[in-house]
Amino acid sequence: MTMWRQDYRSWGRTVSANHVVDRPENRDNATRALSESEFPVLAYGCGRSYGDVALNPGGRLIDCRSLDRFLAFNRATGVLTCEAGVRLADILAVICRPEADGSGWFLPVTPGTRFVTVGGAIANDVHGKNHHRFGTFGRHVLALELARSDGSRLVCSPEQNPDLFAATIGGLGLTGLILSATLQLRRVEGLAVEAEDIQFSSLSDFFDLAEASDRDWEYTAAWVDCLASGAHLGRGIYSRARHYPGKGVEPPGRNSRLSIPITSPIPATNSLSVRAFNALYWRKLGLNGQTSRIGSYEPVFYPLDAIGEWNRLYGPKGFYQFQCVVPHEQAREAVADMLRLIAQSGEGSMLVVLKTFGDLPSPGLLSFPRPGVTLALDFPERGTTTRKLLRLLEEVAVAAYGRLYPAKDSLMTPDAFRQGYPSFEQFQPMMDPRFSSAFAQRIGLIKGEAQL
């Protein structure tokens, strides 16, 4: 089915574009739609990319959400083969169920939402709170089937078509259409998690907690009060978790329990509400400054999934997300500089995540994670002042030899991309010549000018 649509937009709701859209019902139809297209093409999954990486203005989108079949699962080995439109939520609901002793199979890597497709997780080589233990999603892809615009369908793995395999993992959907993938799930002794939250008072405290926690805890990340300054710069709440042996929990539902029905005409996030939220949230642990619990992994891994369409809370103008990673050697100074810029700007963010990445390399040429420290924030779109702040943050990250995350980006400059991803020259020959995206045009990976 093909038609013009106007409502394909970024998750941040700052960019949207018209597309010719195909919704193939099976892999054969998807391959046919790709080879017969007269427009530049791009795959589309659940639309959870914050910026323009999943948009293809004036071109064709192949909406893969109907490619949602499980093809094989070996319960003895945990090897799963499924189509690219299967969501992580579907895998959790079907495969990741506890056995009598509480153990079971689990996703080796999961981002902060379970509402992404397997194809999208591969194309963006997503990461999670356990990067220091398990690396990126792409490390657990055993093989994938890729359709190219010349009509070919290739099996790609570390042994078959290894160069194309490396380009496709983290390749932003530009090497072809991922039809299916074979994944190695992870065996855990308990599907429940033991979780702790610890209040900390400064950026230096964060680094001390991260160093201690990464040794003994599988999942680690911190929320930071980005409006705190002076001696309290970088204060926040450190969260850490690990699977709890012998205790099982049922997976969360396949959909959110609540949903925001319409876009708020007035953003729920403004300078006053952000400041009040940050001050209250930092104190939520009470006088003890620490809490612990054992139970479901849903509130630990997917807190925002409880509210469907939560992005509508930012109002009609939407929001930008900024995420960077800088090497460990430059991290303390660079993160402090970025937090000072944010505090001085008054732009503020409620959703601020600070985490250390490990040294497990990704097989992907353009994978975002690298050893270092990553900072991620949401900023409501307020026009020139917001864009100026994001440019300043980019400059700090680039000067510290860091890189920005394409899946979260809307404004990255071509120079920042080239410095942050020096393997782009090795990647370009592996791109499918008929694939395109607004991001690829904007940063100069392909010729053309995105019209957003």
Image (tube, rainbow, N blue to C red):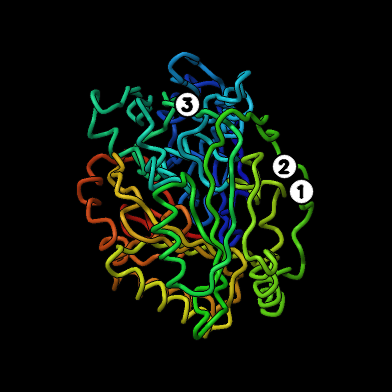
Q: Which mark is residue 259?
A: 1
Which residue lies under the disc numbered 3?
187
Q: Position of residue 116 (x, y in %)?
A: 55, 40
Give residue 161's quadrant in the image: top left
Q: Which mark is residue 32?
A: none
Residue type at mark 2? Ser
- Whether 377 is drawn above or below 39: the answer is below
Give residue 122's quadrant in the image: top left
Q: Are marks 3 and 2 in contact (CB under 8 Å)?
A: no
- Whether 74 is drawn above or below 135: the answer is above
Q: Is residue 388 visible?
A: no
Which residue lies under the disc numbered 2?
256
Residue type at mark 1? Ser
Residue type at mark 3? Arg
Mark-to-mark CA distance, 3 and 2: 26 Å
Q: Alpha-carbon neighbours of circle 3 within 10 Å: few (<14), some, or many (≥20)?
A: some
Residue at (56% x, 21% y) in the render: 69
Q: Alpha-carbon neighbours of circle 1 within 10 Å: few (<14), some, or many (≥20)?
A: some
Apparent side of residue 352 relative to residue 432 in the rendered image (left or right): right
- Whether 270 is drawn above or below 351: the answer is below
Mark-to-mark CA distance, 3 and 1: 33 Å
N-terminal of the pair, mark 3 or mark 1, is: 3
Apparent side of residue 130 relative to residue 419 in the rendered image (left or right): right
Q: Alpha-carbon neighbours of circle 2 within 10 Å: few (<14), some, or many (≥20)?
A: some
Which image quadrant: the N terminus?
top right
Question: What SS does tag 1 mark?
Answer: strand
Q: How many marks?
A: 3
Q: Position of residue 355 (x, y in %)?
A: 45, 58
N-terminal of the pair, mark 3 or mark 2, is: 3
Apparent side of residue 61 relative to residue 36 in the rendered image (left or right): right
